[in-house]
Image (cartoon, rainbow, N blue to C red):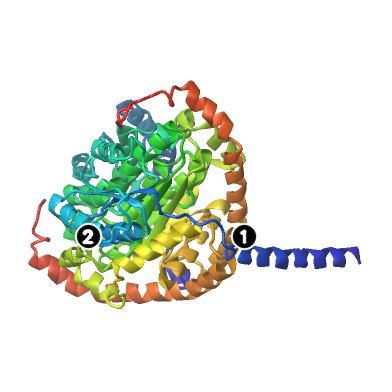
Amino acid sequence: MLGQLWAKSWDPKGKHCYVTGGSSGLGLAVAKLLVLKGAHVSVVSRNAQRLESAMKELETVRTSPNQVLKSYSYDLITATGAREALDAVCEPHQRRNPDAIFMLAGSCHPRFFIEETEETMKTQMDQTYWVQAWTALEASKRMVRDKSKGKIVFHSAYIGYITLIGYAAYGPGRMAIRALADTLRQEFLLYDIDIHIAFPGTMYTPGYDIENATKPKITLKIEETDPGVTGDQYAKGLLRGVQSGDFHISPDLLGNIFRASMRGVAPSSNFFVDSFWNFIGWVGLPIWRMTVDSTVKGHRKEHEEYLSNKGFYSSSNKSFSQ
Amino acid sequence: MLQYLGLENGVITLILSTLFLALWKMWPTKKWDPRGQFCYVTGGSSGLGLAVAIALTKRGAHVTIVARNEERLAKALAELEKTRQSSNQILRSYSFSLTDADASYAALEAASKDHGNKYPDTVFMCAGAARPGFFVEEDAKSMQKGMDNTYWIQAYTALAYTKQLVRSQTSGKLVFTCSLLGYMSLIGYSTYSPGKHALRGLAESLRSELILYNSSVHIMFSGNIDSPGYVEENRTKPKITLEIESTDKPTAPDVLAKELINGVQRGDFHIAPDMLSNIIRSSTTGATPHHNVLLDVLYALIGWIGLPLWRRGVDSTVLKHRKEHKDYLATRGFFKSTD
């Protein structure tokens, strides 16, 4: 903790930064910020069209003709996809591993647990956990083999700390990626690789619209007072956290309260400030939870009608395909 | 003057409500009784699952155990028969691979046939396994298997059971079994702690969501269990992980089974079977309901100082291990591999 007061802030200038999910939302915002700070940036996502318009945006903030700005279309939810993407990304840099990897790809699809199927649960795990884990695995192996220094930046969400109704498939993935980051933080003390993980809350991005399309009404109701930020605003906080060497990055009030309340064994950047956040959470979170529970309880009848209208009670389907 | 009175009232209210909350958890409430209940136990042929099945049988429940290995299931069922309390108890076993979604559903269906197509009153999900290793030595298969054997192996059962509970408009209980590695993580557990944290996430969302259906969730966080699974796990566990864990003695499964059932009876959401679990639980509470507020504050205070100190010690051990680890990777040809 004290060591950070004297630590040199990490500077992206001249470094090769690989950003997954970099064609929209938080990923694009972080990519733009890195370009502004003079980094070489490689962006990977699935949609070729979005990648094209993202590249145009990155070019508008280019600070020097030497910056290498590239984009590639790959699906990162398989180990093979992650490996091929990494190969492509390293190619223009003499096959050298990126100096920093920002894994910001993913999506959220909340719904009632009983409306999940095997497919939707697996997709959600793909979009929260595997889309980052495979890239982390591939990159780690190479970086350790080549004895390179570097940073791997994961992302989770508030829901990776505190979860609630509607997130039964999403919460697990967000908590799982937190666990992976926690494991690697300690394990990578064996190597010269820094681990970071950011926990954004509500962000007004295209992803947010997708999320709200399936989100149960009750979840929307519970969340309606949550403050939100734009992707650009959060990107600034995220990058600041990486530059300062924070492990769990939570550059906002709720994020700090949640993080400190869930700290467990994870290191904190400031023990005393975190103890303060922890105390606030200790008092505030149970109150929040009790009001949410009460809201859910009051929703029983409406929910019963909702399920009835969807023919849930009359279904005799005893498999996961429905 | 008025302000002073107001403050005094406020302090009195705070003290009274704290006392109330503290005593509330100690008040005897209607306890869940396994007698006559239809209990479904996954991973029930060995280790914790078998201990839970035996404990439930002893308390007069109908017990169905589910696991993969038929031979182990047969031996386990024989043990359940030895502790049978009455001739009315329905004791059964079924072989299914619960890392498969359809099999998880089929297993519940098979079990319900013994009870007039009624689904279990309580589902104890004790299935799971660990294969610790260094992250850079993992591959796609081992990572997938890790998630299958920690998360999906319980999540599919939970999904099938919950759907049926709601469909039939009855209430029930889900009991997950997790690990201290569902609260925090440690070097060597990159294929294990994510799935265990995922279980916590599932349980937390479900606790909130099952209020809609008058059903409850419980989840136990235990340390190492003295079981065949533990022996298996230690065969490939990195030496450094073994070294860090060397001060933790594994707990006997029947002790944990008793704690689990007691926790369910008390209505605890997170079940912490010992001092260490309670300390870690209280240090990573988030919005999870407390047990006894005063005790939890005590645990949290211990953790507040103790856990960072412990972690620093472990980090220091890992740092000292760097050279040995480099030699280890070199002997395994890691640096030459182009894979």
Residue A58 marker: none
Q: Using the image as rendered, state which of residue B146 and residue A299 is in the foreground.
A: A299
Q: Position of residue A86 (x, y in %)?
A: 22, 44
Q: Position of residue B174 (x, y in %)?
A: 40, 48
Query: Dot 2: what SS?
Result: helix
> Residue B271 occupies which quadrant of the picture?
bottom left
Left or right of A32 on screen, residue A125: left
Residue linked to disc 1? A283
**Mark 2 belongs to chain:** B
Residue linked to disc 2? B79
**Mark 1 belongs to chain:** A
Residue B108 to residue A209: above or below: below
Amino acid type, label 2: Glu
Query: Cβ–Cβ below 8 Å for labels 1 and 2?
Result: no
Crowd class of label 2 (few under 14; some 14 to 19; many from 20; radius 10 Å): some
The furthest residue to the front: B87
Residue B326 to residue A139: above or below: below
Q: Position of residue B87 (x, y in %)?
A: 30, 52
On the same chain, marks 1 and 2? The answer is no
Q: Residue at x 37, y 51 (%)?
A: B199
Q: Using the image as rendered, state which of residue A17 and residue B337 is in the foreground.
A: B337
Q: Using the image as rendered, state which of residue B88 and residue A137 is in the foreground.
A: B88
Query: Dot 1: what SS?
Result: helix
Asked whether the viewer can see residue B18, the reply is yes
Left or right of A80 on screen, residue B163: right
Amino acid type, label 1: Val
Closer to the observer: label 1 or label 2? 2
Q: Using the image as rendered, state which of residue B188 and residue B266 is in the foreground.
A: B266
**Quarter occupied by the N terminus of chain B:** bottom right
Left or right of B212 on screen, residue A57: left
Crowd class of label 1 (few under 14; some 14 to 19; many from 20; radius 10 Å): few
> Residue B8 occupies which quadrant of the picture?
bottom right
